[in-house]
Amino acid sequence: MADILSVEERRLALDAIADEIKVCTLCPLHTSRTHAVPGAGRVDAEIMFIGEGPGYHEDQQGLPFVGASGQYLNELLHMIGLKREDVFITNVVKCRPPNNRDPLPNELDTCIPTYLQRQVEVIQPKLIATLGRFSMALFFPGGRITKIHGQPRRGNGRIYYPLFHPAAVLRNPNLRPVMEEDFRRMMALAQEVAAQQSAAQSSSDPDDEPPPTPRQLSLF
Ligand code: URA
Protein backbone atom coordinates (compact mmCIF):
# COMPACT_ATOMS: atom_id res chain seq x y z
CA MET A 1 0.00 0.00 0.00
CA ALA A 2 1.33 3.44 -0.91
CA ASP A 3 2.36 5.84 1.83
CA ILE A 4 -0.31 8.21 3.09
CA LEU A 5 0.53 11.59 1.63
CA SER A 6 -0.21 14.88 3.34
CA VAL A 7 -2.74 17.22 1.76
CA GLU A 8 0.06 19.56 0.72
CA GLU A 9 2.03 16.73 -0.89
CA ARG A 10 -1.04 15.66 -2.80
CA ARG A 11 -1.74 19.20 -3.97
CA LEU A 12 1.81 19.63 -5.23
CA ALA A 13 1.84 16.23 -6.94
CA LEU A 14 -1.54 16.79 -8.62
CA ASP A 15 -0.56 20.28 -9.75
CA ALA A 16 2.61 18.83 -11.28
CA ILE A 17 0.58 16.17 -13.13
CA ALA A 18 -1.92 18.83 -14.30
CA ASP A 19 0.95 20.99 -15.60
CA GLU A 20 2.20 18.03 -17.65
CA ILE A 21 -1.29 17.34 -19.01
CA LYS A 22 -1.78 20.95 -20.10
CA VAL A 23 1.22 20.79 -22.43
CA CYS A 24 1.00 17.09 -23.33
CA THR A 25 1.72 16.15 -26.95
CA LEU A 26 1.96 12.37 -26.44
CA CYS A 27 -1.05 11.48 -28.61
CA PRO A 28 -2.81 13.08 -31.58
CA LEU A 29 -5.65 14.47 -29.44
CA HIS A 30 -3.45 17.42 -28.51
CA THR A 31 -3.68 18.80 -32.06
CA SER A 32 -7.42 19.47 -31.89
CA ARG A 33 -7.87 20.49 -28.26
CA THR A 34 -8.55 24.01 -27.00
CA HIS A 35 -7.67 23.12 -23.42
CA ALA A 36 -6.60 19.87 -21.87
CA VAL A 37 -8.76 18.90 -18.88
CA PRO A 38 -6.70 17.41 -16.06
CA GLY A 39 -9.53 17.08 -13.53
CA ALA A 40 -10.75 19.07 -10.55
CA GLY A 41 -11.73 18.69 -6.93
CA ARG A 42 -10.44 17.72 -3.57
CA VAL A 43 -6.87 16.46 -3.55
CA ASP A 44 -7.61 14.02 -0.72
CA ALA A 45 -11.10 13.09 -1.91
CA GLU A 46 -12.58 9.85 -0.62
CA ILE A 47 -14.65 9.54 -3.78
CA MET A 48 -13.17 9.93 -7.26
CA PHE A 49 -15.34 10.00 -10.38
CA ILE A 50 -13.82 8.96 -13.69
CA GLY A 51 -15.67 9.86 -16.89
CA GLU A 52 -14.74 9.23 -20.52
CA GLY A 53 -13.25 12.38 -21.98
CA PRO A 54 -13.88 16.11 -22.24
CA GLY A 55 -16.73 17.29 -24.46
CA TYR A 56 -17.16 20.69 -26.13
CA HIS A 57 -17.74 22.73 -22.97
CA GLU A 58 -15.00 20.97 -21.01
CA ASP A 59 -12.56 21.60 -23.87
CA GLN A 60 -13.53 25.28 -23.90
CA GLN A 61 -13.17 25.74 -20.14
CA GLY A 62 -10.45 23.24 -19.22
CA LEU A 63 -12.71 21.77 -16.52
CA PRO A 64 -14.39 18.35 -16.30
CA PHE A 65 -18.15 17.85 -16.47
CA VAL A 66 -19.27 21.46 -16.93
CA GLY A 67 -21.84 20.84 -19.70
CA ALA A 68 -25.27 19.21 -19.43
CA SER A 69 -23.83 15.95 -18.03
CA GLY A 70 -21.95 17.97 -15.44
CA GLN A 71 -25.07 19.81 -14.33
CA TYR A 72 -26.81 16.52 -13.83
CA LEU A 73 -23.79 15.17 -11.94
CA ASN A 74 -23.98 18.25 -9.69
CA GLU A 75 -27.65 17.48 -8.98
CA LEU A 76 -26.85 13.89 -8.08
CA LEU A 77 -24.05 14.97 -5.77
CA HIS A 78 -26.37 17.50 -4.13
CA MET A 79 -28.95 14.76 -3.61
CA ILE A 80 -26.46 12.75 -1.53
CA GLY A 81 -25.25 15.80 0.39
CA LEU A 82 -22.01 16.40 -1.51
CA LYS A 83 -20.60 19.21 -3.60
CA ARG A 84 -18.11 18.98 -6.44
CA GLU A 85 -15.43 20.31 -4.09
CA ASP A 86 -15.88 17.25 -1.86
CA VAL A 87 -14.91 14.79 -4.59
CA PHE A 88 -12.38 14.58 -7.40
CA ILE A 89 -13.67 14.44 -10.97
CA THR A 90 -11.59 13.50 -13.96
CA ASN A 91 -11.68 11.51 -17.19
CA VAL A 92 -9.92 8.57 -18.78
CA VAL A 93 -8.54 10.81 -21.55
CA LYS A 94 -7.68 14.41 -20.80
CA CYS A 95 -8.21 15.93 -24.26
CA ARG A 96 -11.44 16.06 -26.23
CA PRO A 97 -11.73 13.46 -28.99
CA PRO A 98 -12.85 15.31 -32.16
CA ASN A 99 -16.65 15.42 -32.49
CA ASN A 100 -16.89 13.48 -29.23
CA ARG A 101 -15.89 10.24 -30.91
CA ASP A 102 -14.76 7.35 -28.71
CA PRO A 103 -11.14 7.53 -27.55
CA LEU A 104 -8.91 5.26 -29.65
CA PRO A 105 -6.84 2.45 -28.14
CA ASN A 106 -3.53 4.30 -28.59
CA GLU A 107 -5.01 7.40 -26.90
CA LEU A 108 -6.25 5.33 -23.95
CA ASP A 109 -3.01 3.37 -23.69
CA THR A 110 -1.02 6.59 -23.57
CA CYS A 111 -3.20 8.71 -21.30
CA ILE A 112 -4.21 6.16 -18.65
CA PRO A 113 -0.76 5.11 -17.35
CA THR A 114 0.78 8.52 -17.90
CA TYR A 115 -1.85 10.55 -16.05
CA LEU A 116 -4.94 8.80 -14.66
CA GLN A 117 -3.04 6.08 -12.85
CA ARG A 118 -0.76 8.64 -11.23
CA GLN A 119 -3.73 10.79 -10.18
CA VAL A 120 -5.31 7.77 -8.47
CA GLU A 121 -2.03 6.99 -6.68
CA VAL A 122 -1.83 10.55 -5.34
CA ILE A 123 -5.46 11.00 -4.33
CA GLN A 124 -5.78 7.49 -2.86
CA PRO A 125 -9.58 7.54 -3.00
CA LYS A 126 -11.56 5.05 -0.94
CA LEU A 127 -14.07 4.70 -3.73
CA ILE A 128 -13.68 5.08 -7.48
CA ALA A 129 -16.96 5.61 -9.32
CA THR A 130 -16.84 4.98 -13.05
CA LEU A 131 -19.03 7.04 -15.37
CA GLY A 132 -19.44 5.36 -18.71
CA ARG A 133 -17.93 2.37 -20.42
CA PHE A 134 -14.31 3.40 -20.88
CA SER A 135 -13.61 3.94 -17.20
CA MET A 136 -15.78 0.94 -16.33
CA ALA A 137 -13.68 -1.26 -18.64
CA LEU A 138 -10.58 -0.38 -16.61
CA PHE A 139 -11.93 -1.90 -13.42
CA PHE A 140 -14.66 -4.25 -14.67
CA PRO A 141 -13.22 -5.79 -17.84
CA GLY A 142 -15.96 -7.41 -19.90
CA GLY A 143 -18.69 -5.93 -17.65
CA ARG A 144 -21.93 -4.62 -19.13
CA ILE A 145 -23.24 -1.49 -17.45
CA THR A 146 -26.89 -2.59 -17.65
CA LYS A 147 -25.95 -5.68 -15.63
CA ILE A 148 -23.34 -4.40 -13.19
CA HIS A 149 -24.29 -0.79 -12.41
CA GLY A 150 -24.41 -0.16 -8.68
CA GLN A 151 -22.57 -3.39 -7.87
CA PRO A 152 -19.34 -2.62 -6.01
CA ARG A 153 -16.12 -4.56 -6.34
CA ARG A 154 -13.39 -4.39 -3.72
CA GLY A 155 -9.69 -4.37 -4.63
CA ASN A 156 -6.46 -2.52 -3.79
CA GLY A 157 -7.99 -1.47 -0.47
CA ARG A 158 -10.76 0.47 -2.17
CA ILE A 159 -14.19 0.09 -3.70
CA TYR A 160 -14.84 0.32 -7.43
CA TYR A 161 -18.38 1.34 -8.25
CA PRO A 162 -19.82 1.31 -11.78
CA LEU A 163 -22.36 3.99 -12.68
CA PHE A 164 -24.19 4.87 -15.87
CA HIS A 165 -22.77 7.87 -17.67
CA PRO A 166 -24.88 10.95 -16.84
CA ALA A 167 -25.31 11.61 -20.59
CA ALA A 168 -26.89 8.16 -20.99
CA VAL A 169 -29.39 8.98 -18.24
CA LEU A 170 -30.18 12.35 -19.82
CA ARG A 171 -30.88 10.53 -23.08
CA ASN A 172 -33.04 7.92 -21.34
CA PRO A 173 -34.95 9.50 -18.42
CA ASN A 174 -36.27 6.05 -17.43
CA LEU A 175 -32.81 5.50 -15.94
CA ARG A 176 -33.12 8.42 -13.53
CA PRO A 177 -34.51 6.47 -10.55
CA VAL A 178 -31.88 3.77 -11.11
CA MET A 179 -29.08 6.33 -11.21
CA GLU A 180 -30.39 8.04 -8.06
CA GLU A 181 -30.59 4.75 -6.21
CA ASP A 182 -27.04 3.87 -7.33
CA PHE A 183 -25.80 7.23 -6.01
CA ARG A 184 -27.50 6.70 -2.64
CA ARG A 185 -26.00 3.24 -2.32
CA MET A 186 -22.59 4.59 -3.28
CA MET A 187 -22.79 7.17 -0.50
CA ALA A 188 -23.89 4.55 2.04
CA LEU A 189 -20.92 2.39 1.06
CA ALA A 190 -18.49 5.29 1.33
CA GLN A 191 -19.87 6.11 4.78
CA GLU A 192 -19.50 2.48 5.83
CA VAL A 193 -15.85 2.41 4.76
CA ALA A 194 -15.11 5.68 6.55
CA ALA A 195 -16.75 4.37 9.74
CA GLN A 196 -14.81 1.09 9.56
CA GLN A 197 -11.54 2.90 9.05
CA SER A 198 -12.16 5.32 11.84
CA ALA A 199 -13.06 2.41 14.20
CA ALA A 200 -9.90 0.54 13.14
CA GLN A 201 -7.85 3.67 13.70
CA SER A 202 -9.16 4.27 17.22
CA SER A 203 -8.77 0.63 18.28
CA SER A 204 -5.25 0.23 16.86
CA ASP A 205 -3.55 2.62 19.27
CA PRO A 206 -5.53 4.94 21.50
CA ASP A 207 -2.46 7.14 22.06
CA ASP A 208 -1.86 7.67 18.36
CA GLU A 209 -2.15 11.13 16.91
CA PRO A 210 -5.46 11.60 15.05
CA PRO A 211 -5.30 10.69 11.35
CA PRO A 212 -3.61 13.36 9.21
CA THR A 213 -6.79 14.32 7.37
CA PRO A 214 -9.61 14.17 9.93
CA ARG A 215 -11.78 16.59 7.95
CA GLN A 216 -12.20 13.89 5.34
CA LEU A 217 -14.08 11.69 7.74
CA SER A 218 -16.46 14.45 8.73
CA LEU A 219 -17.70 14.33 5.15
CA PHE A 220 -19.49 11.17 6.03
N1 URA B 1 -18.48 13.53 -20.42
C1 URA B 1 -17.38 12.97 -19.86
O1 URA B 1 -17.20 11.75 -19.89
N2 URA B 1 -16.51 13.77 -19.28
C2 URA B 1 -16.66 15.09 -19.21
O2 URA B 1 -15.80 15.75 -18.63
C3 URA B 1 -17.81 15.64 -19.78
C4 URA B 1 -18.71 14.84 -20.38
Image (cartoon, helix red, strand yellow):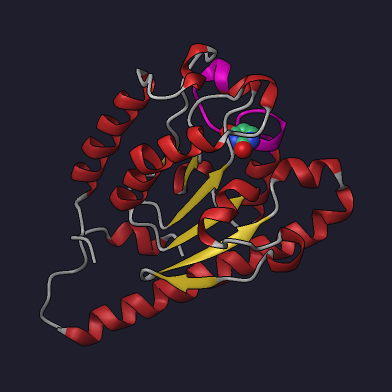
> In the depicted view, which residue is nearer to us: 88 or 209?
88
Label count reads 0
Q: Residue at (22%, 61%) from the top-left corner? A: 2
The percent coordinates of residue 33 (x first, y second) are 52, 15
Q: Which residues are magenta?
A: 59-71
Relative depth, front residue between 101 and 120: 101
User: In the figure, 32 relative to 132: above or below?
Assistant: above
> Can residue 159 be seen?
yes
**Quarter of the displayed picture in which ligand 1 can be seen:** top right
Q: Is residue 162 left or right of residue 39?
A: right
Q: Quadrant of residue 19 in the image?
A: top left
Where residue 124 appears, as percent x and y from the top left, is 33, 56
Residue 202 x %, y %? 24, 81
Which residue is depicted at the point 56% across and 20% down? 59
Is residue 39 magenta-colored?
no
Between 21 and 30, which is closer to the camera in this rendering?
30
Q: Quadrant of residue 196?
A: bottom left
